[in-house]
Amino acid sequence: MRVVIADDDDDIRALLEIAVRRQGFEVVAGVADGRQAWTAIQELRPDLVVLDLTMPGMSGLEVCRRTRSDPELRGIRLVLLTAAADAAAFERGLEAGADEYLTKPFTLPALAQVMVAGGSAG
């Protein structure tokens, strides 16, 4: 599975990359903002994108919306990461097209569950 990771926090992005590789997946891009994420999605056509909700340039919600509105990209799995654990934030994420929503701080087993099984975790 080819994965794009987008988070503006260098430490979290590095942790995500390690977790993805431990699952046997390939990190095709690790980026620090939403515009870079959108470019990587268009150019690399990953199987999975792990997106921070709040990033400079373009939010994770906007990246989700754009991905879902493009017929060639619709099949990409999108996982949103955020510190916002309230129901309204969760709904906004799902409405934007996220397949999963994982709250920070997250555990590596919870992330693995979302990546591998597609089950919700938090």
Image (cartoon, rainbow, N blue to C red):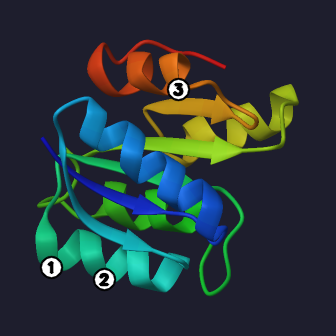
- Which quadrant would the N terminus be assigned to in this image? top left
Q: Are marks 2 and 1 in contact (CB under 8 Å)?
A: yes
State the residue position of label 1.
43
Q: Is residue 77 above or below residue 85?
A: below
Image side of residue 1 versus residue 57, left or right: left
State the residue position of label 2.
39
User: What amino acid type is highlighted by mark number 1?
Assistant: Glu
Disc 2/disc 1 C-alpha distance (Å): 6 Å
Question: Which tag, 2 or 3, sits closer to the chain's start?
Answer: 2
| Element type where label 1 sits in the image | helix
Crowding at label 2, few (<14), some or many (≥20) Cα neighbours within 10 Å? few
Task: Tally the marks.
Answer: 3
- Which quadrant would the C terminus be assigned to in this image? top right
Which quarter of the picture shows residue 67? bottom left
Taking depth in this image into account, of 8 and 61 the one nearest to the observer is 8
| Element type where label 3 sits in the image | helix
State the residue position of label 3.
108
Residue displayed at 41% across by 15% down: 113
User: What amino acid type is highlighted by mark number 3?
Assistant: Leu
User: What amino acid type is highlighted by mark number 2?
Assistant: Thr
- Residue 76 picture location, percent across and down: 23, 47
Which quarter of the picture shows residue 27? bottom left
Q: In this view, does 39 lie above or below 13?
A: below
Image side of residue 60 versus residue 9, left or right: left
- Residue 40 picture location, percent across and down: 27, 76
Disc 2/disc 3 C-alpha distance (Å): 27 Å
